Amino acid sequence: MRAPVLVTLCVCVWVLSDAAARQFTEEEMAAIRQRIKSMFYHAYNSYLDNAFPYDELRPLTCDGQDTWGSFSLTLIDALDTLLVLGNRTEFQRVASLLQDTVDFDIDVNASVFETNIRVVGGLLSAHLLAGRGGLDLEPGWPCSGPLLKMAEDAARKLLPAFQTASGMPYGTVNLRHGVLPSETPVTCTAGVGTFILEFSTLSRLTGDRVYEEAARRALRALWGTRSDIGLVGNHIDVLSKKWVAQDAGIGAGVDSYFEYLVKGAILLQDEELLDMFLEYDRALQNYTRFDDWYLWVQMHKGTVSMPVFQSLEAFWPGLQSLLGNLDGAVRTFQNYYSVWRQFGGLPEFYSIPQGSTVDKREGYPLRPELIESAMYLFRATGDHTYLQLGLDALESIEKISRTPCGYASVKDLRDHQLDNRMESFFLAETVKYLYLLFDPAHFLHGGGAEGDGSWEEGGEGGRCVLGAGGFVFNTEAHPLDPAALACCGRHAHDRRQLRDVLLGLAEPTGQSRPGKAEAPPPGQSESIALKAGERKTPPLSCPVQPFSARLAVLGQVFTDGT
């Protein structure tokens, strides 16, 4: 049973008529895309001119600072955005520059979570887009390549954090020396459960299972710590597996854990991950949802602990749309959009009972989550209301945050005081999702006519069809191509089959090699995409699978018959 609510909620009624009345023409959308490009290049060029090679731009003082590790983070994070906007020349230049200048063997304490989603995710995405971006490709791409090697170098530096008895990683690791003796074992839930996309992609592209195995072990360990009512808290001790912060919700510290269960299920066609999320979702709907807001509750009792909306929760309507829950997604989005319209941005914390910001949480660091949800909901519904949100966001950011040296985070939405920081996710996520919202025919949406560059060949001998649709975005908006994972996994399986055949021919008749056959690559022979009871051994070829069909109508993820 849901615990009784001890607060009175302010239910914001959002009138759709004004926003829904406007229909955007193709010409208007094209003009808005040009404005978004101008926004990107003002920020990007300001970073190059004033902050490179530091991690981030300080837009009020026109200089730079290292924040998450000292490896030109904004440039890595923005690399695939360059290609999304169509700038192949700069994409090629920066890809080459990063290969020459970035070194992960440095004595720096880095966030395991942030390095994974921004650096590993950014490099993987750029690698998978390298063919479309006009880079010189190694034979066998996307199963090899210099950007893939960089991504693996970065991920390998994170692996020592996973060497715990529980399998759950520390939150911080020294890139040269590993986990320091003084490192705290307490980390947030998202810091444990936000690796399956990047690490599985690495494993399936390179054939090295260690990354996916580490991510899965952490997920399963975290799954085993949920409370009797099916919830997880906010911070956990990875050594003792005891919850340190027992607030349960969908916002800061937890958000991308739930996101990766859903997107991991889609990317990997993995029923285990989807089942985990659906069980969590039942508990979240029962204990945390009130009038289409999601509150924070005590993880063991379900009693309300914080009746607040956090800006990071705004990803949730987009996630709901991927699962086909459009009615719930639309209602929750309406609540969140009402907050945006009240302030011209989403404050970090918003008190639902009081209808106001929370003390010391009044800022807006140019986060993308509401724009991200608008993109998904526009794709699902075609409702131009979501384009209006995009235009509102564009104009708010231009009016409030633009400086001579980029765009500054908003320190306080009540008086629009600015902060001297432009996070890398502004170029990686906020601008990218804005652009994609207004470009429904973009290749990342599966757009483009046949012969128009909407897909490309890859793999050994060009036997794989890549980039045909169904891209899955990591939590930093770096798109990953499911076809590439299947392509490289199939090549590895084919090579093992061929080796076994050749070894069998070399053996005397009637003799067989002792021992068991090697297991297939993760998710290949036991694919949930196979019909029930089907156990065919595929030919030595790269299959063409309709990934986009599995992502499309009302969140239909898995094929019929599974």
Image (cartoon, rainbow, N blue to C red):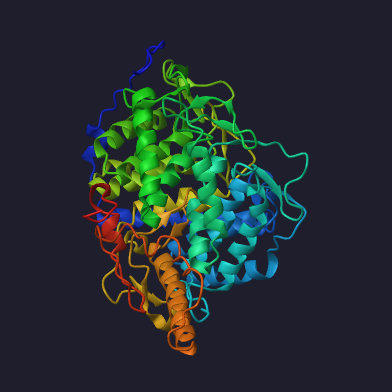
Position of 76 with respect to 309 (left or right) is right
Whether residue 366 can be seen here: no
Percent from the top left, x then y, of residue 446? Answer: 31, 62
Position of 323 with respect to 110 (left or right) is left
Residue most toward the front?
A: 510
| 346 is higher (above) or lower (below) than 508 | above
Position of 514 with respect to 239 (left or right) is left
| 194 is higher (above) or lower (below) than 105 | above
The quarter of the displayed image where residue 343 is located: top left
| 545 is higher (above) or lower (below) than 502 | above
Percent from the top left, x then y, of residue 66? Answer: 70, 49
| 336 is higher (above) or lower (below) than 47 | above
Name the foreground residue: 456 vs 438: 456
The quarter of the displayed image where residue 211 is located: bottom right
Name the foreground residue: 258 vs 375: 258
Residue lying at 54% horizontally and 24% vertically, measured from the top left = 246
Name the foreground residue: 413 vs 428: 428
Name the foreground residue: 94 vs 342: 94
Residue lying at 47% horizontally and 67% vertically, measured from the top left = 128
Whether residue 554 can be seen here: yes
Residue lying at 40% horizontally and 81% vertically, measured from the top left = 462
Image quarter where the N terminus lies is: top left
Position of 402 with respect to 521 (left or right) is right
Percent from the top left, x then y, of residue 373? Answer: 37, 43
Percent from the top left, x then y, of residue 278? Answer: 35, 38
Report the label total: 0
